[in-house]
Amino acid sequence: MRSFSSSAVVGRGPARAGAAGLEIHYEPMGDLASGEVVGAEALLRRRLPGGVVQIAARFLPEAEAAGLLVGIGRRVLDRACEQAAGWQSTRRGASVTVNLSATELADPGLTGWVEAVITRHALRPELLILDVPEVVVARAALDGGPHLQHLRELAGLGVRIAVDDVGTGPAAPTYLPLVPASLLKIDGRVVRGLERPHGPQVVLALAALAHDLGLLALAEGVEHEELLPRLRGLGCDLAQGYAVGRATSPGQIARLL
């Protein structure tokens, strides 16, 4: 197995998402204890004429306004699960993370679609991680209703729920016990604040909260390798960011695995 601490790569030839100009890049996820890449997050990108690549935040609001977001999200989920199923010949147990917006979480057909996709690709449900922003999860937990019900249905399938951007929004102890989460993702802004007063204590507290609730703690936006052992010492289990590896093609991810 290759250690991710020396294997950061630049993406080439990412997979097409099934729509003009859309591509899927995969950002490695590393285990801080073993130093191995154990999965990847599917990141949607749009390639413009001339080769310029846009991140999802630049074009998805436009897609949502046009009523296209759910359809795009379904194509990404299908392609990512197909990719993850293919990784199993290289490393059994490698997970794929797919982002889920508030609009997608409200889709009444969400649970049935997810179940159909993992069944079609013969992907073990626990190898699919659905990444939901903290503000969406908190609202679902505190308001109840269909959003929370969908999270529970997805967890009932065996799919894992990750709470994204933790540390910059609502108070996590208020809502986390109410949702069926498996993974807490500490926001990159919190990680980059390690050198500020009380920065390490914030990371330590969030990781401890995750563990107290039976969740794994993942540090996002880790840009420098020297932070990896420090974050492990503060209780983080997993990490993403340049120190682990840049978003890259399916073929490169398979080699890292």
Image (cartoon, grey):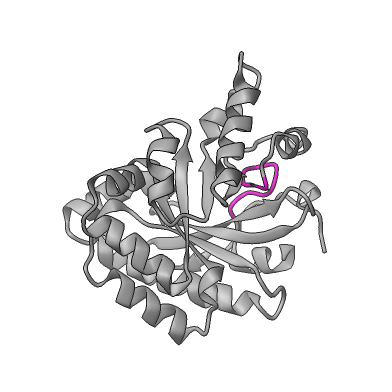
Q: On the picture, is 228 further left or further right than 175? A: right
Residue, x 63% and y 31% (percent of image)? 204
Q: Residue at x 67, y 64 (%)?
A: 252
**Residue at image x 59%, y 59%?**
40
**Above or below, comparing residue 235 to residue 26 in the picture:** above
Q: Is residue 221 visible?
A: no
Q: Which residues are magenta?
A: 237-247
Total of numbered circles in the picture?
A: 0
Q: Nearer the viewer, residue 111 or 179?
A: 179
Outermost residue, top side = 197
Q: Position of residue 178 (x, y in %)?
A: 38, 49
160 over 122 or under it: above or below: above
Residue 130 in the image: state x and y as whole percent.
44, 60
Q: Kindly indicate the quadrant of the structure image that contains residue 145.
A: bottom left
* Helix, strand or loop for the magenta stretch, by majority: loop
Closer to the camera, 114 or 154?
154
Where is the N terminus found, in terms of image quarters?
Answer: bottom right
Residue 248 position in % (x across, y down): 60, 57
Q: Position of residue 59 (x, y in %)?
A: 31, 49
Q: Is residue 245 highlighted in magenta?
A: yes
* Up/down of 30 relative to 38, above or below: above
Q: Quadrant of residue 108?
A: bottom left
**Residue 160 seen in the figure:** yes
Q: Nearer the viewer, residue 103 or 124?
A: 124
Pick the quarter of the image with the C terminus.
Answer: bottom right
Of all residues, the one furthest to the left in this rendering is 66
